[in-house]
Amino acid sequence: MLGKYLENVRKKSPLIHNITNYVTVNDVANVLLACGASPIMADEPDDAVEITAICNGLNINIGTLNSRTIESMFKAGKKARELGHFLLLDPVGAGASKLRTDTAVNLMKEIKFDVIRGNASEIKTLVLGSGTTHGVDADKADAVSDENLSFMIDFVKGFAKNSGSIIALTGAVDLVADAEKCFVIRNGRPEMGRITGTGCQLSGIMTAFIAANPENKLEASASAVCLMGLAGEIAFKNLQSGEGNSTYRNKIIDTVYNMSGKILDEGAKYEVR
C-alpha cells in the first residue's frame, strides 16, 4: 500500500531545495508544506550550493532558464550528489528550444538523478539526446494510451536502465518505472492541465517522498504521483458553480494538506507491470 510513504513525509518533514521556475515557485512551496515537507528556494550560484548542503533533497526544474540559474543547477546538483542527497530533474520544455534541450541533456550526463519526471515529449527528447534509443522506436513515444501501453512500459523501463534513474512519465496515464518494474497509474483529471504548475508541484512532492523513503524510492515516487492525481480528482468534485481554474489550484493544494495515508490507499488507482 502506498499511503505509508505519505505518512513518512509527515513524520520526517524533509527539507527540499527547489531550483524551480518563477511561474510556479509559490505553488511548489505551498504544496510541499501541504504534504508535510519543508521547502526552500535559492538560485544564486554560491547561495544555492550552501543551501543544498543543508537540505535532504534537490528538485531541479528548467522551466525558466537563465545563465545564473543554469550555473546554480549544475553546482547545486553536484554538491547534492557529493553529499548523497536525493535529486530529481524536471526537464520542462526539453525539445522546445536548444537551450532547454542542451541544459537537460547535460544535467543528465553530469549529475546522477534519482528520479527524472516529465511528459512524453520531454522524456522522448532526453532519450534521443542521451543516445539510448533510435528515432524509429522513439517516434512511438508521443503519449501513453491503452493501445501502446506495453510498448511505453518497455520504453520507460529501457530509459530507466540506461539512465540509472527512476523515470516518471506523466500524462493521462502515468508510468513510474525502474529497469524492472513499472507502476501504471490512472489517477487524475484532464482539467488539471488547465492549471499552470501541477507538474511542477508534483516534482517537488516526489523529491520529498524519495527523501523521506530512501529504501523504497520507486514505490515512494508512485505514491507521490497517485497523491497528486487523487488530489485533482477530489478537488474537482468539490468545485462549486462559478469556480474555475484558480480555485481549482487552491483546492488541489488544500486536498493534499488534508490527505491521509488511508485516503490515499483507498483512492490510488494503479497496477504494477
Image: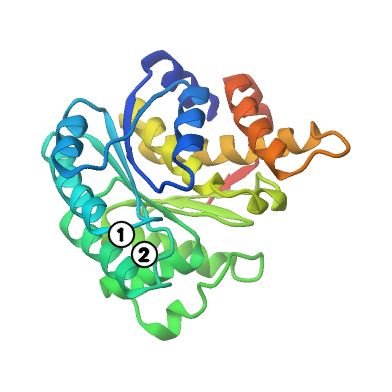
Of residue 225 and residue 62, the one placed in the foreground of this image is 62
Q: Dot 1, how many residues are within 10 Å of its Cα: few (below 14), some (14-19), or many (20+)? A: some
Identified at 48% across, 19% down, the residue is 7
Name the foreground residue: 3 vs 63.
Answer: 63
Where residue 1 sits, quadrant-wise, is: top right
Q: Amino acid at mark 1?
A: Lys
User: Could you tell me if the residues under marks 1 and 2 are in contact, i.e. CB atoms within 8 Å?
Assistant: yes
Q: Is residue 180 above or below residue 31?
A: below
User: Is residue 132 among what the camera can see?
Assistant: no
Task: Residue 116: give x, y in percent of width and height.
Answer: 36, 52
Residue 101 lies, with reference to residue 173, above or below; the image says: below
Q: Residue at x 44, y 43 (%)?
A: 203
Decide if residue 254 is on the left or right side of residue 19. right
Front position in the image: 192 or 129: 192
Amino acid, disc 2: Gly
Q: Quadrant of residue 248?
A: top right
Mark 2, Cα crowd under 10 Å, few <14 / some 14-19 / many 20+, is many
* x and y, in percent, of residue 263 in the image: 66, 23
Asked if residue 237 lies left or right of residue 66, the reply is: right
Q: Which residue is mark 2?
A: 158
User: Residue at (11%, 39%) from the top-left corner?
Assistant: 82
